[in-house]
Image (cartoon, rainbow, N blue to C red):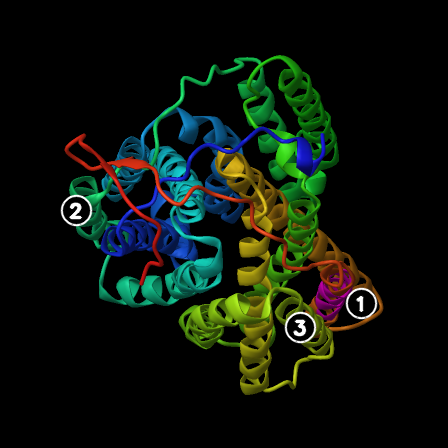
Amino acid sequence: MTEGTMPAPHETPTLSPARVTAVLRILVLSTFVVLLNETIMVNAIPRLMREFEVTAAAAGWLSTAFMLTMAVVIPVTGWFLQRVTTRTAFGLAMALFLAGTALAAAAPAFPVLLAARVIQASGTAVMMPLLMTTLMTLVPPHDRGRVMGNITLVISVAPALGPAVSGVLLQLGSWRLLFLAVIPIAGAMAIFGRRKLVNIGEPQAVPIDWLSVPLAAAGFGALVYGLSGLGAGNAAQAPVPPEAITLVGAVLVGLFVWRQLALQRSSAPLLDLRALTFRHFSVALGLMCLSFMALMGAFILLPIYLQEVCGLTSLQTGLLLIPGGLTMGLLGPQVGKLYDRLGAPRLVVPGAVLTALCLALFALTGEQTSPWLVLALHVALSAGMAFVFTPVFTSGLSVLPPHLYPHGSAILGSLQQVAAAAGTALVISVMSGRAATAAADGADATGALATGIRWGFGIGAGLGALAVLVALLIHTPPAPQQPAASEAQDEDGTTTNKTAHTPT
């Protein structure tokens, strides 16, 4: 099916500028809270290993389980967000997140803490597509770049602040403060959001294909888990080889795709893959995946390099990486405004080139490299990514008709998790292999690790170069026509008719 033969989009509700601003602020601030928690445990791993008497590999599951849960839940959100109201989706996401946070704060044993992280991730997995879908529905095409830029600020800054916030809280007391400090903030956002949010559009009684649910869960879960295991140091001792798990995951995802294509001909699929028939969306998706692989590879290598090669502490490492996250976030609104004026290509191509160049320079670092140079390169890398992500997200989703926004957001979120796992596995595998070779050739432990890290950054530079080639295919697509006015429900259930607007 081609772009010209897609079904007519549903009506797009529009609200007054003040209500749109309020809705987006609620969702953005709530997303900030849940994303901050995603990385807030980085510095707590050693303390948790001692308190619960678990190995580093077991403690690492606190992050792996979060990522796996995101990969499993996000494919279902395309169907879920069409089925329920905005306020219901928001309430469920925040309730899951709060329940997981409270359980984690009181966890008496490691398995309970691990289960709590899974519950938290379930709420986060709903919140991200909800934010993107609501933005694309409410904000007119000519203003999406600026608004997406503001959202990029929050999405970028939250993960960057996580390690630094955890370092400060761990200095003040128990690791449980990481969760106790979040509960009142998340609780306030949940209460305020339920009072102020409005329902965007009408829920649809979309049927669910129960065969697709386990296929998506098992397929994306096994694929992400297998890819994550490929780069693990103990992969050779795993009871089931990660290569086998990755292959099984890829086969199950293939069956999931086949099932969705079959359902598209007769009924409603769980994840509508007709979004991929829009060329602009598919190209943007490919660029996002390559960029995300390179970015996650760099983000996993930098802490190892700074701590194991340069000798910095975990808190020093977190503080050194904050300026990069702030740079990406603060540039987001400016890049968004430039997108509205200049379009995507003039921003994406220079951003991709800068990203690839910074990764190539990282590949030249060594034991004697100054941390201040690493800081400058990280800031430049983050700036390049800011010029890529905001235009790519905006132009990619803008070409879709409104009824495909939830599915497009779910596809993007699912492939983000797969790309993150693939990028991490690739660079860690290369780093480990080259470090082992250097050690066998007589290098000391630090020198061997530095060699492996340089090769890992080299792989990231290669991915960045491929991203530059794909960026040349990006252009600003014409947005689909949308009605100037339609209906939306306030929190009291009343229905009002609003006119088109430009939110502030």
In the displayed structure, would residue 259 be above or below residue 284?
A: above
Residue 438, numbered label: 1
- In the visual, does 426 lie left or right of 61? right
460 in the magenta segment = yes
Quarter of the image for the N terminus: give it: top right
Q: Nearer the viewer, residue 298 or 435?
A: 298
Under circle 2, the secondary element is helix
| Residue under the point 80% across and 67% down | 438
Residue 192, numbered label: 2
Q: Which residues are magenta?
A: 454-466
Residue 446, numbered label: 3
Quarter of the image for the C terminus: give it: bottom left
Amino acid at dot 3: Thr
| Residue under the point 58% across and 66% down | 304
Q: Nearer the viewer, residue 355 or 160?
A: 355
Q: Earlier in the sequence, mark 2 or mark 1?
A: 2
Residue 496 position within the rendered picture, expressed as x and y whole percent measured from the top left: 22, 37
Asked whether the viewer can see residue 425, the reply is yes
